Structures are given as C-alpha cells and as structure tokens.
Amino acid sequence: MAGLREVVQDLAARADVDAVVVLSSDGLPIDSAGREQVDVEAVAALAASFVNGARRLGQAAECDGFTAGVLEFDGRLALLRPLGTEGHLFILGAARSNAGPLLYDLRQRAPELAALL
C-alpha cells in the first residue's frame, strides 16, 4: 500500500486537480501538494469548520452521514470528503474541470486514505 504522501502527490498530479490538502478533524494540516499554492493553514481550519457545519445541517434536515461536499466558485470546484473520524480531504479542482470522475475516484479511494491517517 502506498503511503499518505504518495497518495496526496498522486491526487495532486491529476490534470483536474490544482491542490490537495489532507487535514485533521480539528483543522490542522497533515499533508498537501499541488500545482497552485493555497494557504494550507487557512484551508485546513476552514475546511474542518465547514465539515462540522455540514454535519449539523444534515442532522437538522434528518440526513446523517456526511460523505462529501462540492463547492462551486467562479469556474472552480472545491471538494471536501471526511476520511473516517481522523481527518478530511480538501481538493481544489482545476478551472472548468468535470467533478464527476474525480468524485468517483475519491469515493473509491476514501477508505484507503482513511486507513493511512
């Protein structure tokens, strides 16, 4: 099995990904890579807050088990996926990328990533 660093770099090397940040569930950066520089500390802290808020929103709407979130910005997508109870994965998609294949791949690889934390 590949290590966390290898998986993060593999994801960051995709044509449809500009940046990857793996963060702890309390908002601390664990690893990151990508073609574009992002403020890793700020992304980690805000992504963890977003996931916590999304979970509470789901509970209020009687939907349990937050598994992924897609945020759409002007021509950009950001994806958030919890990795078990230990952390989260944030991916900044490349401009105008199709989120479908990336979401599918992340759904397949999420257990592997969670096991690496």
Image: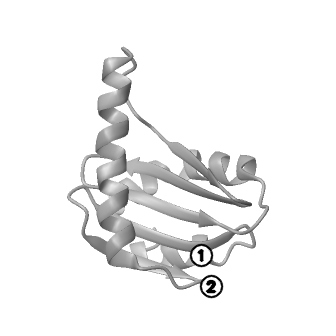
Residue at horizontal 32 percent and vertical 40 percent from the top: 53
| Residue of label 2 | 35
Q: Amino acid at mark 2?
A: Arg
| Residue of label 1 | 12
Q: Residues within 10 Å of mark 2 (few under 14, many from 20)?
A: some
Using the rendered view, name the quadrant where residue 28 is placed.
bottom left
Q: Are marks 1 and 2 in contact (CB under 8 Å)?
A: yes
Q: In the image as oriented, which residue stretches furthest toward the front?
A: 74
Q: Amino acid at mark 1?
A: Ala
- What is the distance, in whole Å, between disc 1 and disc 2 at their CAs? 7 Å
- Horizontal side of 58 relative to 8 (left or right) equals left
x then y, percent, for residue 98: 78, 54
Query: Is residue 117 visible in the rendered structure shown here?
Result: no
- Horizontal side of 15 relative to 53 (left or right) equals right
Q: How many discs appear?
A: 2
Residue 98 vertical position relative to residue 116 in the rendered view, above or below: above
x then y, percent, for residue 76: 68, 61
Residue 46 vertical position relative to residue 38 in the rendered view, above or below: above
x then y, percent, for residue 115: 34, 56
Residue 69 vertical position relative to residue 18 in the rendered view, above or below: above
Residue at horizontal 73 percent and vertical 51 percent from the top: 101
Question: Which quarter shows the C terminus?
Answer: bottom left
> What label does residue 105 carry, if any?
none
Q: Nearer the viewer, residue 60 or 11?
A: 60
Question: Which quarter shows the N terminus?
Answer: bottom left
Q: Viewer-nearest of labels 1 and 2?
A: 2
